[in-house]
Image (spheres, rainbow, N blue to C red):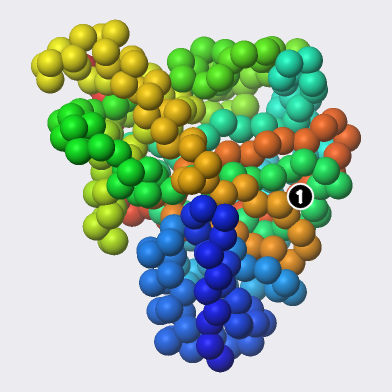
Amino acid sequence: MKLTVTPLDNVGVEVSGFDINEPLTDKIKAELKALWYEHAILVFRDQDISPEKQIEFSRIFGPLELHPLKVTTSDKYPELFVLQNGGPMDKFQTAFYKGEEIVGRLDWHMDLHYTARPNHGALLRAVVVAAEDGMTGFGDLAKAYDALDDDTKALIEQLEVVYSFSMQRRHMRYVNLDGYEPGPNSPTKPTDIGFPDFSDAAYPMVVTHPISGRKVLEVVEQFLDRVVTPQQFGLSNDESIELLERLVAHVQKPEFTYFHKWREGDMVLWDNWRAMHCTTGTKPGINRVINRTTIEGDITLGRVLKTE
């Protein structure tokens, strides 16, 4: 058994040459894990995948983390987090973008970023592929950092950036709100969907990946709020806002992103300590089911802000 590695568009790789249903040697498992740390985004196609095999395969990359909300997990397989469009929860996930009704669109983000302890990664498996739309985007924040000019790198090495949890997209400072209107059933506070009201979390603007050592630009649009005390580093508040706007636009450049068009038998694994992701959503009534397993984050990369 020999792995074949094929570059994707811009970032990440497709890995083939193995059958998930056959026993994988320790050598192959080590190669898969090394590829994960090298490329951050791995795509696997044409696999006959059962929930049990997804769970078993995911454990190659670390211990699994259960989702805290029981309503989003499988009773039979508690390690699975079921992401579904086309069901009764659509009304809470519906919004309008330039007059078009979209279900389940999510801006660029890193999972659990607002807790200061993001999970290490996740594996998505296509169960029901959307008839149209329903893509998932991934962005490599290490490559985005590498492409910055030296002056910007020197500046942001000194800075911390704050993420502030909010249920209402229209209150997020750095997402594109042009033509956006929330749906009539959009949650207005965390308790509406059983979430706690998270404290703000601060991160170094440049995080060193705990395993690979790659420098990661820790700036993504969802929940992004502010730079911590920019005046201490020679920046006015206006300049710090302009810096974040520039970096948010930078990480979304095509050369740092890949959008996955799902088909049956697909799995995608990403390193949440290095890669951001988003979803394009679907039109109302479109069925889409993705099973997700989550790799536990055992390292606190940021800090929870009690006072500033």
Outermost front residue: 149
The picture places residue 59, in percent across and down from the top left corner, at 49, 69
Say whether residue 220 is left or right of residue 302: right
Image position of 136 with respect to 162: above or below: below
**Residue at figure coordinates x 56%, y 31% from the top left:** 107
| Amino acid bearing label 1 | Val
Query: Horizontal placement of 213 versus 175: left or right?
Result: left
Give the class, few, some or many, for how many residues have Cα within 10 Å of label 1's Cα (few <14, many ≥20). Answer: some
Q: Classify the position of the C terminus by image quarter.
A: top left
Looking at the picture, tell me which residue is in the foreground, 75 or 139.
Answer: 139
Residue 164 at what x, y percent from top left? 40, 22
Q: Compared with residue 187, is residue 78 higher up or lower down, i.e. above or below?
A: below
Q: Is residue 134 left or right of residue 53?
A: right
Camera sees residue 205:
yes
Q: Quadrant of residue 265?
A: bottom right
At 47% across and 46% down in the image, what residue appears? 256
Q: Position of residue 17 (x, y in %)?
A: 60, 82
Q: Residue at x 52, y 21 (%)?
A: 175
Quick one: 184 or 192, which is closer to the camera? Answer: 184
Instruction: Judge whether residue 67 can be spotted in this image.
Output: no
Q: Quadrant of residue 160?
A: top left
* Disc 1, SS: strand
Left or right of residue 305: residue 117: right
Q: Which residue is mark 1?
A: 289
Which quadrant is home to the N terminus?
Answer: bottom right
